[in-house]
Image (cartoon, rainbow, N blue to C red):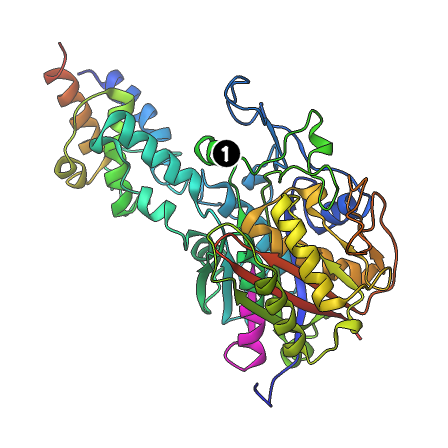
Amino acid sequence: MNANRREVVVTGMGAVSPFGIGVEPLWSGVSGGHSGINWIEDVLDLEPAMYPIRYAAAVKNFSVDEHLKRHCEVRNEKSVQMGLVAAREALVQAGLLTPDELPVPEANPVAVIAGSGHGPCHEADAGYHEYFTRGPRSVRPATLAKSMFNSLSSNISIHFGLTGTNLVIASACSSGTLAIGLAATLIRDGFLERALCGGADAPITQAIFTGWTNMRVMARHNEPQKASRPFDAKRNGLVLGEGAAMVVLESCASAERRGARPLARLLGHGTSSDAYHITAPTVAGQVAAMRASLVDAQLEPQRVEYLNLHGTATRANDETEALAVAEVFGRPGDRMPASSTKSMLGHALGASGALEFVICVQVLSHGFVPPTINCDEPDPEVGLDYVPHVGRDHPVRIAMSNSFAFGGSNACILLGRNQ
Amino acid sequence: MTTTARVRVIEQLKPTFSNVSNGRAKVDQLPEDARIIEDIGLASLDLLELRFELEAVWNPTITDEEAISLKTVSNVVDLIIEKSMTERP
């Protein structure tokens, strides 16, 4: 461990979620216990006979041009468009953008480290569709540039003129948390001064939604708002979601120099790999990631006062995660409320960890923990306080967020309230 | 081809140029002597995309070489008119 590590703070946040554009609608939605899940037959062509599930946590009526001042060249790729809009909000809050959406003179180099699970899948979908229906001569030449994975970080860098490190992390459901954790580590150890980091995903395309449907991990319920039931005895799968969240991290010294107000502190980041199975999780892998983040932050488990669970509502994830949390934290009861905001936001894959990071910062700021809705019959064995149905006041000095991905890539992050 | 027909083609080219450049191209005015890259603002990759848009709107068959060789608005109009004359059934 680097003995000269620097303190890292959050100075800006932005979000695009099923609740709307911005951090405030996101926080209002999850703190109020509202569901962002609804029918999507107006978004996708889902023939009832073929699709038993026709709902998702979609970002509806989204138009990138309404939320950016300068012309956006990304026309069809929703994940990148949402990433740009979330980035703008974060950069503005951090005081890094001029009114013309260009970097202020002292901003650069700002790194862009963004996570995505499915990447620019709308353009890839369109390209494959053209190839298989109309042949090789029909595939547009710009398909490659539009569908490459680093389209997300590169278009953010291009649009806002950010000249630091530019890369994408693709680790399925932990991509957003890994991107933020990596950026924090690089700042802490002196490789970067400031970074825009987070995640974006928009997997609600015909082909990908069909793939998730056929995988049979998606929840089936008559009422969309009741479909995502993390840690409930009657849970039967996840609900697909979409969105984006971006945050500005920088060294504490940088924030002080610029006069930027810290919103929270980054305390630690831990990762692990299950090294076991491409979809099945393991208790050992999740325990290792949580413990690694505690070691990184030099904290005992009992110091954590809120846990944002990965909590996808699949039988396998929630059972595994509950056992892993119990192994790390014992039976913390209401000392450490632990909720899954995916009960309201669905699973936004690579964006989920970033959205949940933003939620954790809000938890620290507001002293209020969001609920796990639809958790009617929580698993009694573990004894976790899932904050069922309704959020509540609960002062939190230190929060942890869990993200565990297909592929066995586990990531946890620890945040501290601003002093 | 009459001047009126050329004007009509140019009007149809405005959304075409806008689409291939993702809205970047300056299409308010399209004088025939305007250069596609320098004056209108298309990039070289946009010229390859232009082939697809022209084929979608006017239904001619255009080669990559023909697309890349286009320099001015007038060149594009000439190509569309030439193709529509020769390929008309």
The residue drawn where x is 58% and y is 56% is A404
For residue B55, side relative to residue B12 (left or right):
left
Badge count: 1
- x and y, in percent, of residue A310 in the image: 65, 53
Say what secondary structure mark 1 lies in: helix
Q: What residue type is labelled 1?
A: Phe
User: Which quadrant would the C terminus of chain A be assigned to in this image?
Assistant: bottom right
Question: From what the image shows, is residue A142 above or below residue A282?
Answer: above
Question: Does the magenta segment cover residue A189?
Answer: yes
Q: Which residue lies furthest to the top in this view?
A: B89
Asked whether residue A85 appears in the rendered view, the answer is yes
Query: Which residue lies under the disc numbered 1?
Result: A209
Question: Does the magenta segment cover residue A3?
Answer: no
Judging depth in this view, the residue of B88 and A181 nearest the camera is A181
- x and y, in percent, of residue A187 in the image: 56, 76
Q: Which residue lies furthest to the front in this view?
A: A381
Judging depth in this view, the residue of B18 and A300 nearest the camera is A300
The residue drawn where x is 70% and y is 66% is A327
User: Which quadrant would the N terminus of chain A be assigned to in this image?
Assistant: bottom right
- Which residues are drawn in magenta? A182-198
Q: Which residue lies furthest to the right in this view?
A: A393
For residue A63, side relative to residue A137 (left or right):
right
The residue drawn where x is 17% and y is 18% is B84
Q: How crowded is mark 1: few (under 14 residues within 10 Å), some or many (20 or more)?
A: many
- x and y, in percent, of residue A50 in the image: 50, 21
Question: From what the image shows, is residue A333 above or below residue A419?
Answer: above
For residue A402, side relative to residue B52 (left or right):
right
Residue A106, by quadrant, is: bottom right
- x and y, in percent, of residue A121 in the image: 43, 42
